[in-house]
Image (tube, grey):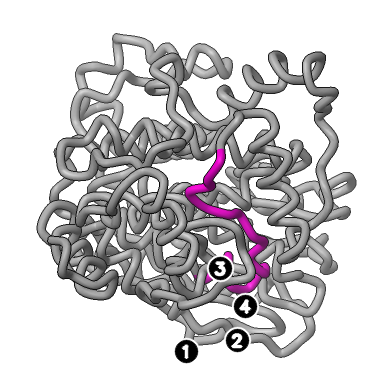
Amino acid sequence: MAGKTIYSLVNEAFLELVYWHTMIAQVVMSCGGVEVVEKSPFNAMAWTDGKGIFLNKEYIKKYEETYGKFSTKHYMFLIAHEALHLMLLTLSRMDKRNRILWNMATDYAINSALINDEGIDAMPTNGLYNTRYSNWKAEDIYDDLLKYYENRFNVDNNLSTPSTKESANEDNRIQNGITNHKYNIDVHIDIDESTAESVQLKVEDIMRNHSAKSEKLYNRLLQLLPEVKFPWKEVLNKYIKGFIKSNASWKLPSRRGLAIGTYLPRIMKTPFINIAIAIDTSGSISQDNLNLFFSHLRKILHSFKDFNIELFCFSTEVHKNTLVKLNKILSKKFNFSDYNLESNGGTNIKSAFEYIENHRDDFDIFICMTDGQDNIRDLSFSKTNVIWVIIGDNKKIFTSPDNVKKAEVIFIDEDDK
C-alpha cells in the first residue's frame, strides 16, 4: 500500500464504488468523473462544482503527515461524500439559511449515511459526525445546530455571501473555529443554475432507474431527501376510471387523504392511470417556471408504477416534435435533461385542448401546466377531466372557463416542490 500513488488509490477507490454502489459511481461519471488536482486554491481535501469531483493532492498530503496515510476506503469516502452532495441537491436546498451551518448540517447527514454503510465507512479524521443525527434530514440538523450555536458563537440565520474561492476558505475557517477541526474534508462552492439543473435531472434519472432499490444506502438517501410537499398521488387517484369499483379497499380511508380534506382509498394495489400533460413554453414562461413544471412532472412519474403518459409542449401551437409517450418501461429510459423544448414565443392555450379533443384516445385526466396568460374565456372542452396547474402572477386572478367541464385548478409555487 505504501508504494501506491494517490492516482492508483483513487482508481482503486472508484472501482470499489462501481462494485459496492453502482448508483453512486453512475452519478460520479455522469457529473464529470474524478480529478486529482496537484495544487488547489481551496483549503480542503475535496470539492465539486457539478462538472466534476476534485481531490486536492497537496492538502491530503498535509493531512497524512498528521493522521497517517489514506487508504482506498478513505478515497471511496471522499468521492462518495461529494457525490451525495449532488444526489441530495444540498446547495439548491440551502434557501436563505446560514451558509456555514447549512454546510455543516449537510455534512453531518451525508457522513452519517456513509458511516452506517459497510461498503463506505472510512471517514477521515475530523469529519463531521454525531450519532445524534442518525436518520435526520439536513433541514432538521440545521435547526438543531442553529439553536445550539446562535448564542455561543453569535451565529444567526442570515445567508452568508456567495461562496467564491476566498469566501469558501473563510467559511471553512469559521467552521473550524466552531468545530475545533484542523483539516477540512471538503469545501462547498456555488454551482451555477444551469449546471445545478443539469445535475438534478441526471441524478433523478439515475436514482429513478436504479435497479438495486433494496440496498441500504439507496433507501437511506431517499429518507434524507425532503418530503414531497404536493400530494400528486392523492390528487390524481380520484380520476382513475373504474378504480372505486375494482378496489375493495375504498371502504378504508386514507389518513393522508383525510388530512387534506378528501375521502380517498387506502392503496392496497397500484392502479393504472392514463394522463396527458401539456407544458406551456411560451415567451412568458421563465426557466424557473419550466424547472418547477418538470419537478412536478417527475413527482407524477414517481407516484404510479403503472401508467401511460403523453407529454408535449405548446406555445402558439402544439409542437409535435416534443411529443413523448411514457409508460412504466419507457420512463426508465427517458432522460429529462435530453428532452427538447420548442416555442414560437406567443401563447395559444386552446391549441393544447384542441389537440386532446381530436386525439383518438381518451385520458383519465388532462393536465395543462401554464401561467394562464392567454384569453381563454370562450374555450370549451368536455372530453375528459382537466387539471390546470397555474404558476406566476396570473394565478391570483386565474379561473377555469365555464365551458371547460370537470376542471380543477391548482396553484403552485417554489414551496410546492
Q: Specify which label sits upstream in the sequence, 4 or 1.
A: 4
Kindly identify which residue carries mark 4.
314
**Helix, strand or loop status at disc 2:** loop
Q: Residues under labels 3 and 1: Cα distance?
A: 33 Å
Kindly identify which residue carries mark 2.
342
Observer-side mark, 2 or 4, equals 2
Rendered residue at 74%/53% (across/down): 391
| Quarter of the figure that contains the C terminus | top right
User: Can you tell which quarter of the image residue 223 is in?
Assistant: top left
Side of 346 where 41 appears, left or right: left
Q: Residues under labels 2 and 4: Cα distance?
A: 8 Å
- Magenta-colored stretch includes residue 283: no
Determine contact: label 2, label 1, CB under 8 Å.
yes
Q: Residues under labels 4 and 1: Cα distance?
A: 10 Å
Q: Residues under labels 3 and 4: Cα distance?
A: 34 Å
Specify start and end residues of the magenta stretch as a single range. Answer: 182-198
Q: Specify which label sits upstream in the sequence, 2 or 3.
A: 3
The amino acid at mark 1 is Asn
Kindly identify which residue carries mark 1.
321
> Residue 120: image x %, image y %?
23, 44
Q: Specify which label sits upstream in the sequence, 3 or 4.
A: 3
The amino acid at mark 4 is Phe
Q: Residues under labels 2 and 3: Cα distance?
A: 29 Å
User: Can you tell which quarter of the image residue 282 is in?
Assistant: bottom right
Side of 340 where 159 appears, left or right: right
Side of 142 where 222 appears, left or right: left
> Residue 18: image x %, image y %?
16, 62
Q: Specify which label sits upstream in the sequence, 2 or 4.
A: 4
Kindly identify which residue carries mark 3.
49
The amino acid at mark 2 is Glu
